Amino acid sequence: MYYYYYNKYYPQDVLVVIEEVNWKENYIIFDFLDSEEFLKFDTFLEIQHLESKTSMVKIVNYSQKRVRENTIYAINKEVFSNLNDSIEIIEDSYLFGYTINLSQNSIPFFLQSVSFNIEEKFNIGAIARGNLSTNFLDIKLKDNIEVNVRDVGQGNWNEIINDKIVKVVYDVGAPMNASKSIVRGYIGNKTIEYSQNKPILVLSHWDKDHYHSLIGMTNLELQCFSSFICPSFLPNITSRILFSRIVSAIGINNVLTIHNLPKLRGIPPILDLISPPNNKLKIFNSTENKDRNKSGIVLAIVTSKSSIIMPADCHYELISNFILPLINHTNLHSLIVPHHGGKAGLYNYNLSPGSNPNLALISVGKNRYGHPMAHYTNSLTLDGFKVISTQDLTNDILIQL
């Protein structure tokens, strides 16, 4: 059922977005569609927690109907009468507001799924608007380029450094379970350096481990960025609050939101080069996809001597089909391994004859997902890459291009 009709017929139900499902450990993470849904949730629980702006909820001991990630569901309002003894407020997190233990609950928690049409996405503020100028995509890099893969555990945070100046920051992430002090430790003195360098901030996609440390920055610290490029679809209240904070910090005229390419029936997804083709820094847009990992902004840098692909969580097949053909395969080629070495589709990386694989860099930390997965690291090694992880080095990895 579409959002408009569901709200019309069942206005008391709370609509949430499923952020993560882990059937092996029986937990689900959800966020709220917007502030109205969050307020309804707080009202039903008789807990006034909205001021903290940490809205994500982790359900543990979940053994009910299966739900899908990145899908909107209604919460059964009847369940709230049994929740108060099973709910814990989380104070030491920039992401999570509550944990709910369903071990003693037999009432169905999630009801039916709810879908959007494009007009409804605009009406509730799920489509962000920024400055539409594509000049933001024309990022010039001189020679003497370095890429720094930051050691932020199970998160993503990359820096493009040109002549010792941080020019671009690609994601500012942290592990989802990181405490506030750990996140602040990742931030450290970076905002001081960024305030001097005024880098461009590019967000690959709106998944929590790619923007967690941004939430941990103060409004004043967010002013360290000169501009912001991000996907236009804001899937939940956490992303909308963060987007609004960044807009307030740097001004709407310094924000470019990228709309995904439309998904066409029978046409496979693509990556589309949206930056000037002769630039060293190449920026790619993705086809609309329910899986955020497949619908993000991807970066690559190509020089006469070397190249590197910064895919965030993009799948190997898309990288191979749409980025590798644009790269000089005879140069020294490195890759930041997609999705922390975790699930990124079938390993398909069609390096041409004469290519010179260099480093496969993995941003990873202690995790329950089995990252990095052996079949990916083994495949990369067989292709000639030297696989290095931040977890092994316990430090940032700086690569000279």
Image: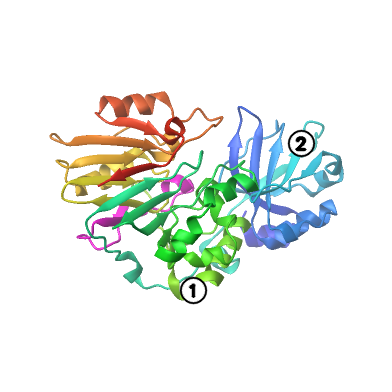
Which residue does the image show at 55% across and 32% down from the upper left? 367
Q: Quadrant of residue 308?
A: top left
Camera-side residue: 216 or 291?
216
Camera-side residue: 394 or 43?
394
Which residue does the image show at 56% across and 43% down from the upper left? 69
Q: Which residue is mark 1?
A: 252
Which residue does the image show at 39% across and 54% down from the upper left? 297
Q: Which mark is residue 393?
A: none
Neighbourhood count class around disc 1 (C-alpha, 10 Å): few under 14, some 14–19, many 20 upward: some
Q: Secondary structure under badge 2?
A: strand
Question: With respect to residue 374, does 71 lie above or below?
Answer: below
Is residue 267 a member of the stretch shown in magenta? no
Q: Which numbered disc, 2 or 1, marks the residue that appears first in the sequence?
A: 2
Q: Which residues are magenta?
A: 269-294
Residue 52 rendering spot, x and y as whole percentages: 72, 57
Which residue does the image show at 32% across and 71% down from the upper left? 135
Q: Which residue is mark 2?
A: 101
- The CA span between labels 2 and 1 is 41 Å
Amino acid type, mark 1: Ile
> In this rendering, does residue 11 appear at all?
no
> In this rendering, does residue 224 appear at all?
yes
Neighbourhood count class around disc 2 (C-alpha, 10 Å): few under 14, some 14–19, many 20 upward: some
